[in-house]
Image (cartoon, rainbow, N blue to C red):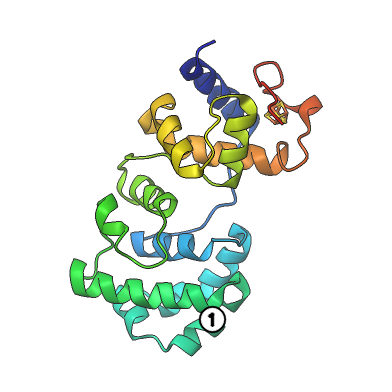
């Protein structure tokens, strides 16, 4: 089967298997999505959601982050880990959004990458989820591992894999691909894959 067909089949089976994906970062505005995604680096989405529940009540605009006392912000996000770096990223991004983008989270890849703590993966997620712009496929640890194991990509870096997979997966399915593979990675195909119980067993190359 060619890779595009395998990718379609993978998504079809995972959608049938899982009633719903997640948990993922919870958000209701592009700014909340951006902040939650920055905080999710090296942290579980469940933990991020616990922290942002309070945080989002206090900080509702980019100006709020820009004006925040860094030590206060650090305390508020402490449990997500790497709190020095993340607090700095939130404050600096708040300032840049205020100064360069009239208080609105930018809509393009190039502009998003001018913010602090925003990787290309974060930018792709924000563009797809907040603005419906599927310019690239976000590759996290689970997506990276699974695409390799299934045999869809042998890229050595997430960036290279994103480039490859963006051509294999249909653009309108980028978010679903990301979320279903993460869900499957958490449930079945983690560090120790449970191939015996996997719905992809017969089409997976098992490059483990
Ligand atoms: S068959 Fe095994 S390696 Fe392939 S996706 Fe399933 S659990 Fe992962």
Residue 57: x percent and y percent?
A: 44, 76
Residue 61 seen anywhere in this rendered image of the structure: no
Q: To which quarter of the image does residue 17 belong? A: top right
At x 50%, y 58%, the residue is: 26
At x 49%, y 74%, the residue is: 85
Outermost residue toward the top in this view:
1
Residue 72: x percent and y percent?
A: 49, 88
Outermost residue toward the right in this view:
196
Q: Is residue 145 above or below residue 111?
A: above
Left or right: residue 107 versus residue 159 is left
Q: Which residue is mark 1?
A: 76
Say what secondary structure mark 1 lies in: helix
At x 78%, y 40%, the residue is: 192
Q: Quadrant of the C terminus?
A: top right
Outermost residue toward the front in this view:
156
Residue 87 seen anywhere in this rendered image of the structure: yes
Nearer the observer, 107 or 25: 107
* Ligand 1 quadrant in view: top right
Q: Is residue 200 above or below residue 62?
A: above
Residue 102: x percent and y percent?
A: 18, 69
Left or right: residue 151 versus residue 34 is right
Residue 141: x percent and y percent?
A: 59, 46
Q: Estimate how packed mark 1 is, as few (under 14), some (14 to 19) or many (20 or more) residues with alpha carbons within 10 Å.
A: some
Number of numbered markers: 1
Q: Quadrant of the N terminus?
A: top right
Nearer the observer, 17 or 121: 121
Q: To which quarter of the image does residue 149 belong? A: top right
Q: Is mark 1 within 8 Å of ligand 1?
A: no
Q: Is residue 52 above or below residue 11?
A: below
């Amino acid at each position: 089967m060619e890779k595009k067909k395998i990718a379609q089949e993978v998504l079809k089976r995972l959608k049938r298997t899982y009633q719903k994906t997640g948990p993922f970062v919870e958000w209701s505005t592009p700014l909340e999505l951006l902040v939650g995604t920055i905080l999710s680096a090296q942290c579980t989405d469940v933990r991020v959601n616990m922290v942002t529940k309070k945080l989002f009540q206090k900080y509702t605009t980019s100006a709020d982050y820009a004006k925040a006392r860094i030590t206060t912000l650090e305390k508020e996000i402490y449990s997500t880990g790497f709190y020095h770096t993340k607090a700095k990223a939130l404050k600096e991004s708040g300032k840049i959004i205020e100064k360069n983008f009239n208080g609105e989270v930018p809509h393009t890849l190039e502009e998003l990458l001018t913010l602090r703590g925003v990787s290309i993966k974060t930018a792709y997620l924000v563009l797809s989820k907040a603005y419906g712009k599927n310019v690239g496929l976000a590759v996290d640890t689970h997506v990276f591992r699974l695409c390799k194991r299934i045999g869809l990509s042998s890229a050595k870096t997430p960036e290279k894999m994103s480039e490859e997979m963006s051509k294999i997966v249909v653009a309108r399915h980028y978010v679903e691909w990301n979320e279903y593979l993460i869900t499957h990675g958490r449930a079945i195909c983690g560090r120790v894959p449970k191939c015996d119980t996997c719905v992809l067993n017969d089409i997976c190359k098992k490059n483990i």
